[in-house]
Image (cartoon, rainbow, N blue to C red):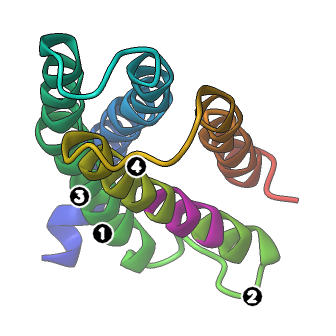
Amino acid sequence: MAVFLQNHFTWILALHIMAFISWMAGLFYLPRLFVYHTQVKSGTEEDQRFSLMEKRLYKQIMTPAMIVTFLTGGVMAVLPHSVDWQSIWWWVKLASVLGMAGFQGCCGLWGRNFASGKNTHNERFYRCVNEIPTVLMMIIVIMIVVRP
């Protein structure tokens, strides 16, 4: 199996990058939807439309993309000579990816709160947290490309 995976490393990497881009697109867009969602009255048809959009984005795009990102990343990480386990870059990248998954979990909670009419955050809050995935993505890319 290891030989098969080594021989198809570039395909696994390509799938990993595509999944990561899809995951990031969702993480960029969902908090923006929350910003717009704060501007509508709870219980209205528009409120329900936003909740449906948020739920579909989360469950049909973000979650599968996150899973594929983790699976392909895990496969690449266990292949011989792909990760220098002594280097700090690997651990910073891993912590950032786990932070990204935690952020997605928070987004899921916020989306459920909107859907149940229990949102407690204002537009400014969602505008601020919308920057978190950008910062984490920058750290991840620097760790992978530069490997400081």
User: Is label 2 in contact with label 1 (beta carbons under 8 Å)?
Assistant: no
User: Is label 1 in contact with label 3 (beta carbons under 8 Å)?
Assistant: no
Residue behind mark 1: 75
Spatial CA span between label 1 and label 3: 12 Å
Q: Nearer the viewer, residue 107 or 124?
A: 124
Circle 3: residue type = Ile
Q: Return the disc, 2 or 4, that comes first in the chain's sequence.
A: 2
**For the N terminus, which image quadrant?**
bottom left
Circle 2: residue type = Gln
Residue behind mark 2: 86
Numbered tag placed on residue 95 in the rendering: none
- Tell me residue 7's x, y (percent): 24, 55
Q: Return the disc, 2 or 1, that comes first in the chain's sequence.
A: 1
What residue appears at the point 29 percent right and 58 percent down from the top-left corner? 72
Spatial CA span between label 3 and label 4: 16 Å
Q: Give the vertical position of 87 relative to 64 (above or below).
A: below
Residue behind mark 4: 107
Magenta stretch: dominant secondary structure: helix
